[in-house]
Amino acid sequence: MRRHWTIAQSTLMGVMALTLLLGSAGLPGGTTSAAVEYTTQFPLDECTWSSTGRNQYFSLRTGDWLLLEGQDDGEFVQVQIKVLNQTKKITFKDEEGESLTVYARVVEEREWKDGELVEVSRNYHARCVQTNDIYYFGEDVDIFDGDVVLHDGAWLAGKDTGKGKARPGLIMPGTFLLGSRYYQERAPDIALDRAEHVQMGLTVTTPAGTFEECVKVKETTPLEPGSVSIKIYCAELGLVQDGVVQLVNFHIAGFDD
């Protein structure tokens, strides 16, 4: 049974949970691991939710955007991430059965290969005001195959996946702690991405410039054992590298003002 925390306790315990890697019991989809544990329990009912604002490494401010480019197996890949002036109402039940409603910000991600649009995803995020943690409440994905649009990997907190109800995950904590491990997505059998903080204090050079106070995150999923994705985020900016693509242009309100 999940503990009832006050706001002050939830902030402290959230940090401790990420640091001490709590929450291995009852991993989504029945996955367990004695060697590597990822936090799955989050004090969602202690939060006041906001669909705007940002923390050090992730923005929900309307109009902010990032453009990343790179070569992947001979293909020129472009990825644009943009915070839209749209929200989505999401209602779900937490681990104790309490109904919660959140208005989540829509963050759209578009991917092109050799100039052809191949994927559009609409990701739903909201920020916990008390901790500045930013949570992930679901996504809709369109994959383009010529004139055919395929839907793949879509999930939404509160909806049944066939293996249980999907619940929010943590996309970027308000405090970045080295060694933290947590689930970003909790949609059994559909989306179970998880993150591990592997480096911090980095200085990173990309085509868009050189940035300090950067951090590295390793992403994996039990749905694809052996699959690893490396992402680098820089302070007050956001994602600057995702696998082979690097930041080439951006608009972040207040950056360098």
Image: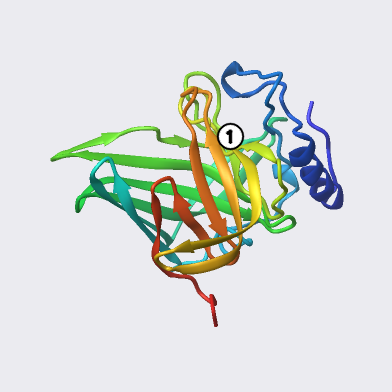
Q: Count of labels shown?
A: 1
Amino acid at dot 1:
Arg
Image point 75% across, 47% down: which residue? 46
Left/right of residue 13 with respect to residue 92 in the rendered view: right
Left/right of residue 93 with respect to residue 251 in the rendered view: right
Q: Which residue lies furthest to the left in this view?
A: 147
Q: Position of residue 249 (x, y in %)?
A: 38, 67
Q: Residue furthest bottom?
A: 257
Q: Which of 257 and 95 is in front in this view?
A: 257
What residue would you read off at disc 1?
167
Image point 71% across, 46% down: which residue? 178
Quadrant (top left, top right, bottom left, bottom right) of the C terminus: bottom right
* Mark 1 surroundings: few (<14), some (14-19) or many (≥20) residues within 10 A: many
Q: Position of residue 204 (x, y in %)?
A: 53, 61
Secondary structure under the numbered disc 1 in the rendered image? strand
Q: Where is residue 122 in the image (x, y as percent from the top left)?
A: 40, 48
Can you tell which quarter of the image residue 84 is in?
Answer: bottom left
